[in-house]
Each structure stands twice: as C-alpha cells, then as structure tokens.
Image (cartoon, rainbow, N blue to C red):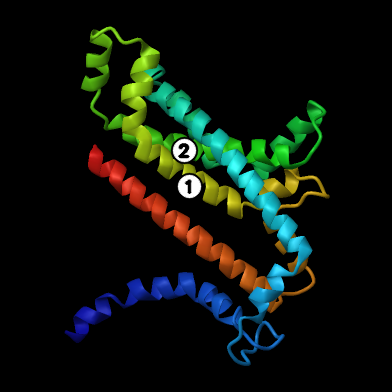
Amino acid sequence: MASRRLIYLPFWAVYVFLYAPIAVLVVMSFNAGKSPYVFEGVSLKWYGELAGDETIRQGLVNTLIVAAGSTVLSTVLGTLLAVGMARYARSRLLDALGLLPAVLPDIVLGIGLLVFYRAIQMTLGLHSIILAHTVFGMAFVAAVVRTRLVHADTSLEEASRDLGATPLVTFARVTLPGLAPGIAAGALLAFTLSLDEFVIAFFTAAPTEPTLPIVIYSMVRFGVTPEINALATILLAVSFTVIIVAQRMTRLTESLT
C-alpha cells in the first residue's frame, strides 16, 4: 500500500510546483497587514480598496470592452475560418497558416501588429487592442470549431442540399446549430485569453487607455502590495471559472461527435 502511494508522489509534487505560488498569492490577498510577504491576520479590506481605486476601475472597464469586442469578432471570423478550412480549402498549409497566430510568441505578434498599425497610420486605442486580440483569438476559436467539424456527420448537410436548400440556408439551419457548443467554447476561450493578455496589449494600446494587465504591471514596478494580490485573485477566479465552463462545453462537443 505504501509503495503504491509513493507512485503518486511525483504526480502531486508537480501539482504543488504548479500551484504553490498561486496559493500563496491568494492567501496573502486576505492579509490584514500592509506587507505582501508577512501574514498578519485575515481581512477583506484590500478587496474593498480595489473598489475605490479609479485607475483600476478604468483599467477593468477597458479590459472588458476589449475582451467583449475581440470575442465577438474572433467568434465570427474563427467560425468562418474553421468552416472554410474543413469544407472548402482542405490544405495542410492553409491549416497551418490559419492556426499560426495561436502559437506565435506574443512579443513577435505584438511588434508585428505595431509596425503594421504605424505603416497604415492607424491611431492606437481600444480599437487597436481589439483588432490585435482578434488575430490570436480567432485562431483559438477556429481550432476548437474545426475539431467539431472534422468529426461531424455530413449526411445532414448533404440531405439538406439534396432537398434544394442553398449553401447559405444549409449552413444557417444545419451546420451552425451543430457547431453551437464548439463555438460557445471557443468564444469563452477567446474571452479568457483576452482578459489576461498583456504583451500584445502593451504594444498596441494608447498610453491613456491601458487595460487592467497593463495597470497591474505599472503598479508592480513599485513593489507588490496586498491590493495587487487581491486584484490578481479576482482575475484568477474569473479565468478559472470561464475555463471550466469552456472545458465542459468542449466535452459536450466531443460527446456529440
């Protein structure tokens, strides 16, 4: 029995390695003292301090605007990209090019977008961040939706066309409803990624309209405070919840295939 437990020891050690820093951050967010490193008792006062910080509130509003806007665009464009790759342009090269933004280093994508914006003389602001987040968000949506499409039964689409429905009607009434769980999971994934993203937003944001991760970065440069720990804990809880929901939707998609 003891030897069997030892087999699982490396497994749990990996989880401790992954989540111990996050656990410390969450615990210190409830610290009653001002020190971010010495726990002096349990308190929720740093969460209350967040509500009164105008800079954080504005950063949060900007982040939600960017996440919502880029999620809508990513979902529409990513779904169309997935349908095009799976139904009309079956090519490994096109597949790779369509999904490449999801694996490109953020700093490369951020610099490339900044150079492009400057080349077309586009001003920076929330709109430039939304477009930038759409670039990598649509790649993730396309990957999730395409997984559903690859395993989908095409007999219903063929039957619809045989009965005289146009390709557009077949897509709207047959293909799209079948893809709904995958589209929803991809949208949630794109929203979460946009919510936490820092590097690309740092290159494509205007100085007067920072997103919340940029605000946090500005605060951290002068030292970590319990207020930052509380803010990071809230972001962690939101991201964790959305990821769990997206994962459940992905499982639903797989169960339907």
Residue at (68, 56) in percent of width and height: 60
- How far across and down, in percent of the image, does residue 251 sit? 30, 48
What numbered label is drawn on residue 141?
A: 2
- The residue type indicated by label 2 comes to Val
Identify the amino acid type marked 1.
Leu
Residue 257 in the figure: left or right of residue 195: left
Name above or below for residue 18 compared with residue 163.
below
| Percent position of residue 224, x then y | 71, 75
Residue under the image location 47 percent in, 26 percent down: 81
Q: Give the answer, above or below, for where 248 lies relative to 255.
A: below
- Count of labels in the image: 2
Mark 2 surroundings: few (<14), some (14-19) or many (≥20) residues within 10 A: many
Cα distance between the residues tagged 2 and 1: 8 Å
Looking at the picture, tell me which residue is in the foreground, 116 or 133: 133
Residue 7 visible from this viewpoint: yes
Q: Residues within 10 Å of mark 1 (few under 14, many from 20)?
A: many
Label 2: element kind: helix
Q: Of callouts 2 and 1, which one flags the residue occurring earlier in the amino acid sequence?
A: 2
Residue that sits furthest to the left in the current view? 1
Q: Residue at x 51, y 30 (%)?
A: 76
Residue 88 vs residue 34, the one in the foreground? 34
| Residue that mark 1 sits on | 189
Kindly identify the residue that appears in the image at 21 percent across and 20 percent down: 155
Where, quadrant-wise, is the C terminus in this rendering?
A: top left
Direction from residue 114 to residue 145 in the image, left or right: left
**Does the residue at mark 2 contact the one at mark 1 (Cβ under 8 Å)?**
yes
> Does 237 sit left or right of 173 as displayed?
right
Tell me the quadrant of the picture where the N terminus can be found: bottom left
Q: Secondary structure at mark 1?
A: helix
